[in-house]
Image (cartoon, rainbow, N blue to C red):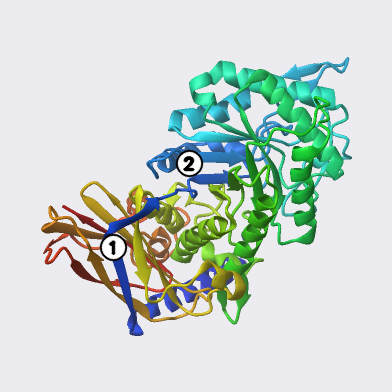
Amino acid sequence: MGLKLRRRFMGSLCGALALALSAHAQGTMSVAVRVAVDKPVGMLTRPWTYFGYDEPNYTYSPDGQKLLHELAKLSPVPVYLRAHNLLTSGDGTGSLKWGSTNVYTEDAHGNPVYDWKIVDRIFDAYRDAGVRPIVELGFMPEALTTGPAPYRHDFPHGSIFTGWSYPPKDYAKWGELIHQLAKHLRARYGDAYVKTWLWEVWNEPDIPYWHGTAEEFFRLYDVSAEAVLRAIPYAQIGGPDTTGPASPKAEEFLTQFLEHCAHGKNYATGTTGAPLDFITFHPKGKAQWLDGHVRMGMAEQLQAADTGFKIVASFPEWRHVPIILDENDPEPCAGCSPLTHPEDNYRNSPIYAVYSALDIKKATALAARRGVTLKGTVSWAFQFDNQPYFVGLRDLATNGIDKPVLNGFRALGLLGDTQLEATSSARISAEAIETHGVPQPVVSVTAARKPHEVEVLLLHYRDDDVTTPAAQVALSLTGLPAAAQHVRVETYRVDTTHSDAYTAWLKMGSPQQPTPAQYRELEAAGQLQRDGTAQHRDVHGNALHLDVQVPIEGLALVRVAW
């Protein structure tokens, strides 16, 4: 990155930071939030425990392994990882939007040669960290592709859709590769672990990630599913991983795929239909740079999700099959730089955490309205090796330093299993966001409980990342049990003054070579932080009343324990 560009980039980010910090001095917005501790409304779902990335070779780098262990500790339910390029040819060197394993080559006579060394490093890292893989069967090995040269792309220069993105020369060889891969993984990792995995075929076949027809993709899917099940009869297989169904082309492809799986002729078995244990597609939002600030586009993301839900619900065969939003993100390109896309500056700041939590909550509500089951929401974010600190790519950590968005997921992970009735005077419905976005500040609430504890998550959000008064929340908890006469109250926060290593880094002067002491300080700033010390409060009449201030684009998790 050139010095001139670097200064311009940092100037814009510092300006955004100053804008956010000034919000604390602009007064408050009064909001009433009520939580009925004695009124459970069901089990709290945790669809957010899924993450993904393009570059599989970053999985086993030191920073990749460090992040995997952090992710494994996020939640009381398992965390899943999805990676592109698990079958791509190459020497195992990763770069933006690229990775390789070289699992398949051919000898001089055209016979398959399998090499599992790099694949094993990836899946060993998952196993050792205690996370689970979504095994994405892609992309096409160089020896099998029908595509032209070049095989490897050079992102961000030129098209990324090079030779790896084409159908196979020989579907039988492709099927045998998938069978041998599944057989090898089962033997190496054992049934107890492998039975927890998910398997899917390819990625975004409705755009040039697949340079074939829809029917050719259905054939790829059928052949792949048969090959996996021949090796692992209990495997859970899904697809088609299309882009956002709000696009007419993506909507048509998803519909055709579901029709094929329900009633089409199976290319591998000759029978009717194809196995489908979960359904996947990719809703994306639309971040914009307007008048010197970022405007997020949650409406676009929820519209895409809701259209997909509606399509799935229209098939009696599939309406009860779980849905995974396999890439569920504020915008389309994780590897694109804010140098050319300044709207992507949001990625370093707490707004990313708040946006993600609110979007997942509202997508869950839309799925319930359509009568379908939302199983997972994959945040397409992991970490990038060999990049400057806080360069602005869509990641969870930078050079081993956790970013605010990861603390948003940590806060979600602290919620209990039983969801409680909760209301906010500044709430907004999923349908309203889908139609109009979030033009004015809102405060969303999610409440849950564990034995002897209640947790209340408050999100203060608007689409425009501009100066807005903090929310002064009058939080009332009613129906506390008789045992809760004396309680301990603590509040965790994610905003520009808490759980935000990016702000700490800016205050240091943006060092690209932090000293060991600076690095330790940044590591600490990248953890979920409590606001002050715990308070001890008396409960009167089974009710507790608290005042909580939540800055704009911030979240607060209030824990009440007895």
Q: Regarding mark 2 in the picture, which secondary structure is present there?
A: helix
User: Mark 1: which amino acid?
Assistant: Ala
Q: Position of residue 423 (x, y in %)?
A: 36, 69
Q: Position of residue 511 (x, y in %)?
A: 44, 59
- What is the number of the mark on residue 63? 2
Mark nearer the N terminus (1 vs 2)? 1
Q: Position of residue 82 (x, y in %)?
A: 59, 40
Instruction: State whether residue 160 appears in this view.
Output: no
Residue at x 52%, y 45% (from the top left corner): 50
Q: CA distance from mark 1 to mark 2?
A: 42 Å
Viewer-closest of 12 and 31:
31
Q: Quadrant of residue 176?
A: top right
Viewer-closest of 15 and 510:
15
- What is the number of the mark on residue 36? 1
Q: Regarding mark 1 in the picture, which secondary structure is present there?
A: strand
- What is the number of the mark on residue 67? none
Residue at x 67%, y 47% (from the top left corner): 97
**What is the count of numbered marks?**
2
Which quadrant is the N terminus positioned in? bottom right
Q: Residues within 10 Å of mark 2 (few under 14, many from 20)?
A: some
Instruction: State whether residue 364 appears in this view.
Output: yes
In the displayed orientation, state which residue is furthest to the bottom. Answer: 26
From this view, report whether residue 215 is shown above or below residue 458: above
Residue at x 72%, y 34% (from the top left corner): 88
User: Mark 2: which amino acid?
Assistant: Asp
